[in-house]
């Protein structure tokens, strides 16, 4: 390589070093709030300043510091999988679906227990590469592998 190319690299490094001292936008635009209390922010992309992608982040409520999981709609927005933030109607709809699933799961569990079902049996695992389930072999653990 010629010496000019090396000088060009050092010029870029020096320019980036000097630019690192310039003030940057620290505060973002408030985009929304979820039902947990997380506040979501964004600094939009600005191609004139060389910023190709938007910066997105969230601040959890005081005392919860990143303990609760982020709702799926907001996580997809944070990870740039969706362009627009979720609407309030979309969030409420997904919450209603999640609550309905919890209620239906509780009903199914009660129905299973009422029919005489028991708690799920522990799966027997051994040196084999697959688990053994007694209910699929006639229920007799001694007679599991006999041909009929």
Image (cartoon, grey):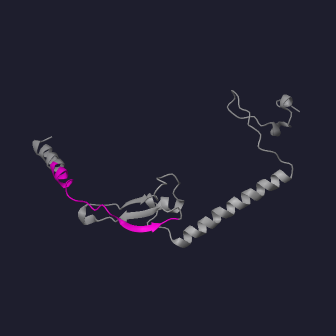
* Residue 30, image x, y percentages: 39, 68
Q: Is residue 113 above or below residue 48?
A: above
Q: Is residue 138 left or right of residue 72?
A: right
Figure label count = 0
* Residue 54, image x, y percentages: 35, 62
Q: Is residue 1 above or below residue 49?
A: above
Tell me where residue 25 sits by quadrant.
bottom left
Q: Is residue 2 above or below residue 105?
A: above
Q: Quadrant of the C terminus?
A: top right
Task: Please give the name of the residue rendered at 51% of the width and 51% of the height, measured from the top-left corner.
Answer: 67
Q: Is residue 138 above or below residue 48?
A: above
Q: Quadrant of the N terminus?
A: top left
* Residue 94, image x, y percentages: 59, 65
Q: Is residue 59 found inside the magenta-colored segment of the image?
A: no
Q: Visible in this render: residue 146?
A: no
Q: Which residues are magenta?
A: 14-34
Q: Is residue 18 found inside the magenta-colored segment of the image?
A: yes
Q: Nearer the viewer, residue 46 or 87?
A: 87
Q: Visible in this render: residue 55?
A: yes
* Residue 73, image x, y percentages: 52, 62
Q: Residue furthest top?
A: 127
Q: Is residue 47 left or right of residue 86?
A: left
Q: Nearer the viewer, residue 12 or 62?
A: 62
Task: Please give the name of the residue rendered at 55% of the width and 73% of the height, measured from the top-left corner.
Answer: 89
Q: Residue furthest right?
A: 148
Q: Residue furthest bottom?
A: 89
Q: Is residue 18 left or right of residue 139?
A: left
Tell me where residue 5 sits by quadrant.
top left
Task: Please give the name of the residue rendered at 81% of the width and 39% of the height, measured from the top-left corner.
Answer: 136
């Amino acid at each position: 390589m010629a010496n000019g190319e090396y000088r060009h690299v050092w010029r870029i490094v020096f320019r980036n070093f000097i630019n690192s001292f310039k003030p940057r936008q620290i505060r973002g635009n408030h985009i929304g709030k979820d039902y947990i209390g997380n506040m979501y922010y964004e600094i939009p992309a600005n191609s004139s300043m060389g910023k190709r992608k938007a910066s997105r982040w969230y601040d959890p409520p005081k005392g919860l510091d990143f303990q609760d999981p982020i709702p799926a709609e907001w996580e997809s927005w944070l990870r740039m999988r969706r362009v627009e933030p979720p609407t309030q109607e979309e969030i409420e709809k997904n919450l209603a679906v999640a609550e309905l699933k919890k209620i239906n799961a509780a009903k199914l569990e009660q129905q299973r227990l009422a029919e005489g079902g028991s708690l799920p049996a522990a799966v027997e695992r051994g040196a084999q590469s697959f688990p053994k389930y007694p209910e699929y072999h006639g229920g007799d653990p001694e007679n599991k592998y006999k041909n009929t």
